Amino acid sequence: MWLNKMIVYPHAKINIGLQIVARRDDGYHDIETVIYPVDLRDILEIKPSLQTSLFLYGMPVDGQWQDNLCIKAYHLVQADFDLPPVQFHLYKQIPIGAGMGGGSSDGAYTLRLLNDYFSIGINELRLQEYATCLGSDCPAMLNKRPLLAKGRGEVLSNVHIDLSQYYMLICMPSLSISTAQAYAQAISKKPKLPLGQLLNLPVGEWRGQIVNDFESILFPKYPVLQEFKEKLYKFGALYASLSGSGSALYGIFESEEKREEARDYFTELQAFVW
């Protein structure tokens, strides 16, 4: 007997470095980046229903609900396990087009949610395969731990980074950037040093060493992004960066006081702040 309902909380992420290493024959790019989880979360609920549907709340989401990754995840699993129809309720708190993996996390958590709700016993390897079908970031979002991502983002390995002793601020102007459009402008280049090696540096030495290659693509087109990054440094961030290929930036601060000064500034600008 299935539960009346079940709720999960898909988490967001930031990217620590993002190297666009090569363009692939399949049209994708090989990258190298660290997916670092953060506690900003959506809320996803599943209920039994006479027909499958998705109800969206909170921050606006572009497109038809039928194209949402939660629904795509359901259809992937339903095709193999003949699942009955369900009703999803998704409360969006992770901004769209931010480079914070909100949609990917919703899709990945849907896979786990279906597995647990229906007790169908999908193992970790198969969950990873489903997630890879959904999108490049989805496999990394199945597990809430720092991961070094290579290939399209689906080749994952553990990486030991702990930022819990620092204070993080995420800010985002009123701007949403399409992942597909950002990658369409991507220029690959061989990095001077692999990201895995640069991560051995102390956080205070990341500035100018660990780079998100999308900054050189997006900053000229959207100057406000560069302005936000410069302000994060002005308020005392040890390290600041664009996240993924989106419009969110983050700063890592050594003191809570400096972080809160930056928070007040960006809040007054009516930017998204977390």
Image: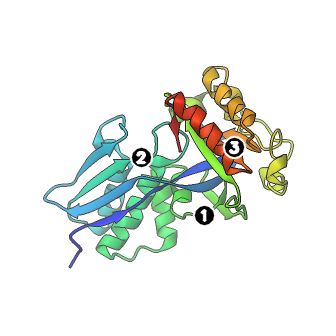
Question: Residue 151 appears at what percent x and percent y?
Answer: 65, 51
Q: Amino acid at mark 2?
A: Gln
Q: Give x and y (percent) for residue 191.
A: 81, 41
Q: Secondary structure at mark 1?
A: loop
Mark 2 or mark 3: whose residue is earlier in sequence: 2
- Relative placement, left or right, of 17 versus 193 is left
Where is mark 2, residue-wise? 93
Q: Nearer the viewer, mark 2 or mark 3?
A: 3
The label number, if any, that marks residue 258 in the structure image: 3
Q: Residue at x 63, y 53 (%)?
A: 35
Q: Pointer 1: residues within 10 angstroms few (<14), some, or many (20+)? A: some
Q: Is residue 245 above or below residue 139?
A: above
The numbered mark at residue 127 is none
Residue designated by label 1: 145
Q: Quadrant of residue 112?
A: bottom left
Residue at 68% x, 27% y: name it: 226
Classed neighbour count for the residue bearing mark 2: other residues with Cα under 10 Å, few (<14), some (14–19), many (≥20): some
